[in-house]
Amino acid sequence: MKIAVLASGGVDSSFALHLLQSQGHDVTAHYLKIWNPQYEQEGTSCPWQEDVDSVKAICNKLNIPYVIHNLQIEYEYTVMAYMLEELKAGRTPNPDVYCNYYIKFGAFFDNISFKEYDYVASGHYATKKTDTDDCIYWHSADPLKDQSFFLSKLTFSQIKKIIFPCSNFSKKQIREYAILHDLPQKDKKDSQGLCFIGKINYGEFISKYIPNKPGLIINDDDDGSVLGQHEGLHLYTMGQRHSIHIGNGPWYVCGKDVNTNILYVINKLKLHTTMTNVVALTKLQLHIEHPVRYIKYKHPQTELLAGTIVQPEDRTKFGFKLDKEQSYLSFSSGQVVAMYDEDYCLVGSAKIA
């Protein structure tokens, strides 16, 4: 088969290139460039040129072609626009989820011809039982690395065109494979940070687009006493305990009011009062109409949360009743929730209300 491989310059995509070629497939590496110089920060940067050099290194070793796609504009008008809109509204965005939907398997799909390629291969830790399967499964071979969460917004038409060579391999096994075959990326560290942007100071990065707006920090435990001042609501999310510069803690964010610009916090001693068995959800999107049995709301999350949907007839406002109580501080408005059926098939997504 002819396969377009999404190549980031990391060990996972290099493993995918080598494995697929060794299986007799005709592979081409594709690097997606979205880095914009305006993202630069003092002391931090996206090593995109290093990544391109890394892609070239594995392609030279395997004697395969590579293509670089410039998707800066597409990224700005989709992923960045979504992220900033959510932050301004006081919600918690998941830019990597939307990056996969709009860029990796959206704009990139528009840039290539499926008359030329049979499939697109990705280095995600996710599983399809067969290449033609329309279902992505929770990656049980390495639950800590499972990345099905980041693919939860993909549509049926996108999923059926993707294969996952890392399926059924653990990260340790892929590292061992890279060492065995002397891949140039055998010692390269995993990338961290926003999709394609790299490791950055998140607060400084966002402040370029959303000015800090100081406001009050209020104790949600008692009579509403003022504990201090925050730098801007967009810098905080539910359950956060760092960057809350007040004494007698630790304190945890338990609410945000964008109308009054107030940040509500709760003391560690009161965490037992935050337990709930229902997660309020909105914007249910199912690409497979199977009953939802499990959810995943963050990465990493080594265990899926079991439960059942309540009020499923209203996809704009419904709930997920948990089998076991969780702290509501775990769930931030705007967060994407990946949804699975009883067989751990990823059937769609929703957002926390």
Image: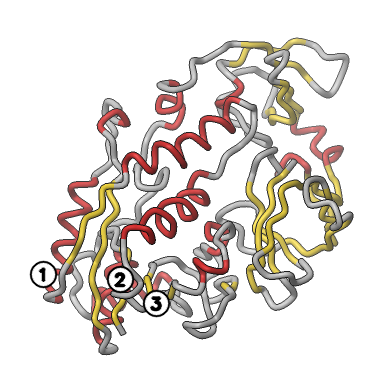
What is the three-letter code of the residue carrying label 3? Pro
Q: CA distance from mark 3 to mark 1?
A: 20 Å
Secondary structure of the residue carrying tag 3 is loop
* Residue 324 versus residue 221 in the image, above or below: below
Please name which of the two marks, 2 or 3, marks the residue nearer to the observer.
Answer: 2
Q: CA gap, disc 2 to disc 3?
A: 12 Å
Q: Earlier in the sequence, mark 3 or mark 1?
A: 1
Q: Say which residue appears at 30% left-offset and 65% top-offset.
A: 11
Q: Please identify the residue farthest to the bottom as the structure is shown.
A: 24
**In the image: residue 185, left or right of residue 150:** left
**Residue at the image position 15 percent from the left and 55 percent from the top:** 53
- Image coords of residue 161 (percent x, y): 45, 73
Type of amino acid at the residue the image marks with label 1: Asn
In primary-sequence order, the first of circles 1 and 2 is 2
How far across and down, in percent of the image, does residue 49 sit? 18, 47
14 to the left or right of 118: left
- The CA span between labels 1 and 2 is 16 Å
**Tag 2 residue:** 4
Dots 1, 2 in contact, CB < 8 A: no
Q: Is residue 13 left or right of residue 298?
A: left
Disc assigned to residue 165: 3
Q: How far across and how far down the image is residue 260, in percent?
A: 72, 13
Q: Which mark is residue 60?
A: 1
* Left or right position of 313 against 263: right
Q: Secondary structure at mark 2?
A: strand
Q: Badge 3 local density, few (<14 within 10 Å), some, or many (20+)?
A: many
Q: Earlier in the sequence, mark 2 or mark 3?
A: 2
